Image (cartoon, coloured by chain):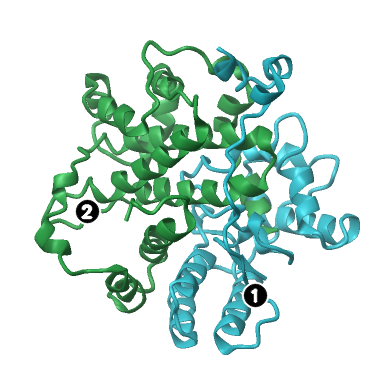
Chain colours: A cyan, B green
Amino acid sequence: MASILSYLPVVSRFVGNNEQFRSIDLPPVEVHNVETAPEKRPRTLKHLLRANHVNHSILFHNLQYHNHMPHALCSAYLLGASDTQLHKIYDVESEELEPWKPSPAEVTKGDWRDFLGDKRYQRAYVDFFEDALAMRHSYDWKKVVEEYVFGGKEPLVNSILICGRMFPPSTNGLSISTDIHSWAPYYPSRICL
Amino acid sequence: MEALAMATTQYSFHHKYLDDPSYTKPSPFKSSSPQELLERMAHDGRFNRLFETPGYHNLRLLFEEHEDIVLEYWNAWSLDDPKKQFQESQEAAVSLLVNTVPPGTHSYNFYVVHVLTTSHAVRILLPVIPDKFHVSLVRQWWLFAIAVYAIVQCPKIDPDYIRPGDVAGKQWDYVIDKALNGAYSADAHFIKGLNTLVVITEVEFWTDIS
């Protein structure tokens, strides 16, 4: 019984400590740090990810499709792709992507939950979280994630896998296990920027 | 921060199943095996009649009109030993992708590959997120897996689809070569699907899945 009750946020406070939060204890995965790696391959990955960040919105084609550039680049990198192969992926993926478009308005700390699910605010949300990163969390992205993914009454973590467009950000937060840099959580897997 | 922007712009009603504890309730049946429950779905006549054609367009209808069946299966998964059950869920995710493609076809499903990649995402997240979200994150994946399997109309999962002659002598280096140099080497979903299959054996906590 306790095992079922422990699913429930309220009830779980009253079951034993061992049952309160049944953790799944696994070792963290390997982190690939490409931020300061001197070799051409990781530098190429870093440059292309940044280029994608600057040049392409995360949603495109009437806000229906997801920008999968980071998925493709990081997956290929992890499989050992050369800098030439990474460039090829960038060129092919770029063909269908679109530049950023302005959002209808800014998102602020007071109203950021009011626009959840509104894809037109993609740029505003990026700006909002980047501002939070720089101005309130001293470039510690884990603090931003702590506040906005795990904090609050209905935390975003409960909506990160299954989402409206059915393209789960399968990699969303994958690099929570990685470290640093403003857009690290976007990138699939264990790549550290 | 794009990840957070993605999470916010993609936010949808599905969060309520995790946020509202009333959706977690006893099911008429239960099993600790995701694979067993998926097979039960495949033989559950109710799913056969839900949609005319398989696809993403069924998603909203699934939850709007058939939420009760979804929740039945969602709540049927018992996680008395969550680590073991998570392992089994990863095996089920692999099986769902590779064992639903009949011989001679290449009909790998776009949505099904996300069941696998999200399972791997859960694996990477578990060691670094607060304990209290561990089981709910795994259950969030399970809800997603059920939804995907239902909207693609529960294709048969048959390990015998993989014919020994097709894989004889091939190792992971063959897979990696296809990912990086094959005809689909610039297709994000092809690459990340294969990458997940490759790393799932080295990153995850078991090795026998290979």
Left or right: A117 as drawn, with respect to A86: right
Which secondary structure lies at badge 2? loop
Residue type marked 2: Ser
At horizontal 32% and vertical 34% (from top left) the residue drawn is B35
Give the crowd class for mark 1: few <14, some 14-19, many >=20 residues within 10 Å. Answer: some
Which label was assigned to residue B71? none
For disc 2, the marked residue is: B107
Which secondary structure lies at badge 1? helix
The N terminus of chain A: image quadrant? top right
Q: Position of residue B14 (x, y in %)?
A: 54, 31
- In the foreground, A88 or A94: A88
Left or right: B198 as drawn, with respect to A70: left
The reply to whether residue B9 is in sight is no
At horizontal 45% and vertical 36% (from top left) the residue drawn is B84
Left or right: B176 as drawn, with respect to B77: left
Q: CA distance from mark 1 to mark 2?
A: 34 Å
> Is disc 1 in contact with disc 2, using a CB cutoff of under 8 Å?
no
* In this view, B140 is above or below B105: above
* In this view, B177 is above or below B10: below
Give the crowd class for mark 2: few <14, some 14-19, many >=20 residues within 10 Å. Answer: few
Marked residue chain, label 2: B
The C terminus of chain A: image quadrant? bottom right
Q: Position of residue B19 (x, y in %)?
A: 64, 26
At horizontal 30% and vertical 49% (from top left) the residue drawn is B97
* In this view, A28 is above or below B23: below
For disc 1, the marked residue is: A50
Q: Quadrant location of residue A2? A: top right
